[in-house]
Amino acid sequence: MDSKQLYQEVILDHNKKPRNWGKLADASHQAEGLNPLCGDHIWLSLKLDDERVESIAFEGEGCAICKASSSMMTTNVKGKTVTEAEQLVREFRDMATGKLDIAGEPNHLGRLTVFAGVRDLPSRVKCAILPWHTLQAALHSESVVSTEGDRDPVPAAS
Amino acid sequence: MTSASTVLQAVKPAGALDVGRIRADFPILNLEVNGKPLAYLDNAASSQMPKQVIDRMVRYQTSEHSNIHRAVHTLSEKATAEYEGARRKIQRFINAKEEREVIFTTGTTDSVNLVMHGYGRAFLGAGDEIIVSQLEHHSNIVPWQMLCEEKGAKLRVIACNDAGELLLDDYAKLFNANTRFVAITHVSNALGTINPVKNMIATAHRHGVPVLVDGAQAVPHMKVNVQDLDCDFYAFSGHKMCGPTGIGILYGKAQLLEKMKPFEGGGDMILSVTFEKTTYNAIPYKFEAGTPPIAAAVGLGATVDYLESVGLDRIAAHEHDLLTYATEAFTQLKGVRIVGTARDKAAVLSFTLQGVHPHDVGTILNEDGVAVRTGHHCAQPVMKRFGIPATVRASFYLYNTFAEVDALVAGIRRVQKIFG
């Protein structure tokens, strides 16, 4: 695949100017996401109000794919209900691992489909998925999620 | 090819490496990746195999294979002769005093673990100290940590300076009455630093301490003479020196190997077995339990023949030219930081790009057909020392060309353009 397909303007822009950067002072849920193989490391904090994501923020270190995925995730789940957010987590994961055909199957991913290209780059799938699994961990009040070890969220993808 | 590289090649002395002829020996180098000619610059992770070695392994498997040291039939005797012949080639190659000092293992990691179990577990105890360096690959750290945990021993670490050179004065000061072992790398896989292991071994010996050298990144690229180094153990892998995976070597001084405990129990490592008592075989067989990867061992013998036919000195000179050319080109690039600038350096170029994560660099270079390694290179303490999570690493070998360095540099310019 061509890098222009993966490193699209929108990804490069979110990498350079990540949205919702920082930590929420009044977070109700938070989690840390870690990919020890490449050093991606993010902290996610969010505030739920009546089962709805009222505010969300992240900060950390990582590659462009991880950072842009984190940034676009925050803009996409803000205002969504927990159920809607979890559905996005599932759909994003399935898209990145090639289980969801974004052209043929109905989904709610919208602009997040710019990440579809990672399915052809097995070594980069985890970079894209890490923030989404961190979100899921935060929603379930788990404090740390790692892409390696017993709790690897995407073992089949590596 | 650019004019600069043409000039560099034009001034090469007679007797220099004919890279075109070398490349013809390596079928995989004809591959295209993403529609571009493959520029394979990940040799520190694993090198490619020439057809002479591939053919030798096919010949072994098609006309010589049986189990070794077993039966009296023709094939078994042939297989045994070829396996032991490979051992003799390796003995000569590293100038070991005796054949029985050369043990076949599955690779460097296996070799280090063999010494940890066979020597470390037998002779180290609570309060004893093991010296390693900050430049070690995880495979020369973790086994010793496991030993420390089991025995209550302690790991001491030789620090390095900003160039990635070990601080030898500090090293000398680490020795005390409790120091029992030193495990150091000959060449850093992450930075390319060539450590002055001969001097470091002499220092350790003045304190009566044996030394294991991790030679995984040295043996493929330079002449190694274990008697001249006077190392007690020396470990390396086949697949980083144009040989097969699954085979490696542990060299050990005979008097040490003899007093060591076996690592694994099984067939071939025994003289006699009863339920009351087992008598172990002599070295090296004491350490070669079970059926070894015979084809790979024979292949490693052919690898030694190949490298000797090309000449380690000529390989080293060519790699040095490539490193000099690449380093020069990199210093012209803005926003590039070379990590590891030791005066004595192997053909490894580790670097970071300002504002771009190494994995993004690696993905984009791959689209240009340029294969580099990105990550922590199984040397996280090195990354920590330089305050970075990862680097991009280009590592060169005998078949690499100046045009491939140009492709790397062009790829980096493209990365910088994409990331603006």
Image (cartoon, coloured by chain):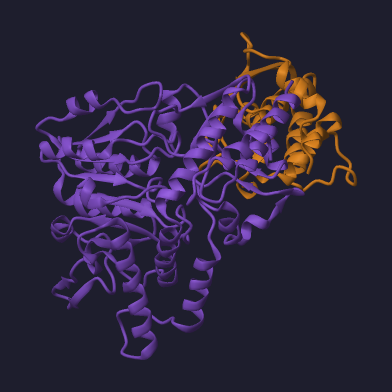
Residue A13 position, x and y percent, is 77, 20
- B348 versus A67 height, above or below: below
Q: Nearer the viewer, residue B395 or A113?
A: B395
Q: Nearer the viewer, residue B241 or A54?
A: B241
- In the visual, does B97 lie left or right of B80? left
- In the visual, does A54 lie left or right of B409? right
Residue A41 position, x and y percent, is 57, 26
Q: Colour of chain B?
A: purple
The picture quadrant where one finds residue B409 is top right
- Residue at 24% across, 66% down: B99
The picture quadrant where one finds residue B411 is top right
- In the visual, does B280 lie left or right of B42? left
Residue B388 position, x and y percent, is 50, 24
Which part of the image, by quadrant, shows the N terminus of chain B? top right
- B272 versus B289 height, above or below: below
Residue B212 position, x and y percent, is 25, 46
- B376 versus A22 height, above or below: below
Question: Which residue reaches farthest top?
Answer: A25
Question: Which chain is orange in the rendering?
Answer: A
Is residue B381 something that shows in the picture?
Answer: yes
Q: Nearer the viewer, residue A83 or B416?
A: B416
Is residue B391 something that shows in the picture?
Answer: no
